[in-house]
Image: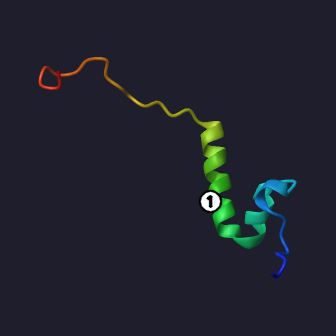
Amino acid sequence: MSKSPLLPWEQAPDPRAILKQTDPAIYAAIEQERQRQQDHIELIASENYVSPSVL
């Protein structure tokens, strides 16, 4: 059995470092989305009432 040069995901000091090394494009996309979610609030509209046909 060959040994992987990278630590298992759970044992890495920063698990994202594995992704950054192996696929920088995916890492960048995930980091951009993480930053977007951290910086902006996203409200989802919902209704409190249903139409009679649903009841």
Please tell me which residue is depicted at 85% across the width and 75% down the height of the picture.
Answer: 5
Q: Is the C terminus in the top left, top right, bottom left or bottom right quadrant? A: top left
Please tell me which residue is depicted at 51% across the width and 34% down the height of the picture.
Answer: 42
Mark 1 Cα shell of 10 Å, populated few (<14), some (14-19), many (≥20): few
Query: Horizontally, is 7 left or right of 35 in the view?
Result: right
Please tell me whether residue 13 is drawn above or below residue 26 in the rendered image.
above
Q: In which quarter of the image is residue 1?
A: bottom right
Please tell me which residue is depicted at 62% across the width and 59% down the height of the picture.
Answer: 29
Location of residue 32 in the rendering, given as x and y in whole percent from the top left corner: 64, 53
Work out whether residue 36 or residue 2 is closer to the camera in this orientation and state it: 2
Query: Horizontally, is 7 left or right of 39 in the view?
Result: right
Please tell me whether residue 27 is drawn above or below residue 5 in the rendered image.
above
| Amino acid type for the residue under numbered disc 1 | Ala
Please tell me which residue is depicted at 64% across the width and 56% down the height of the picture.
Answer: 30
| Residue denoted by label 1 | 29
Q: Check disc 1 and report its element: helix, strand or loop.
A: helix
Work out whether residue 24 or residue 7 is closer to the camera in this orientation and state it: 7
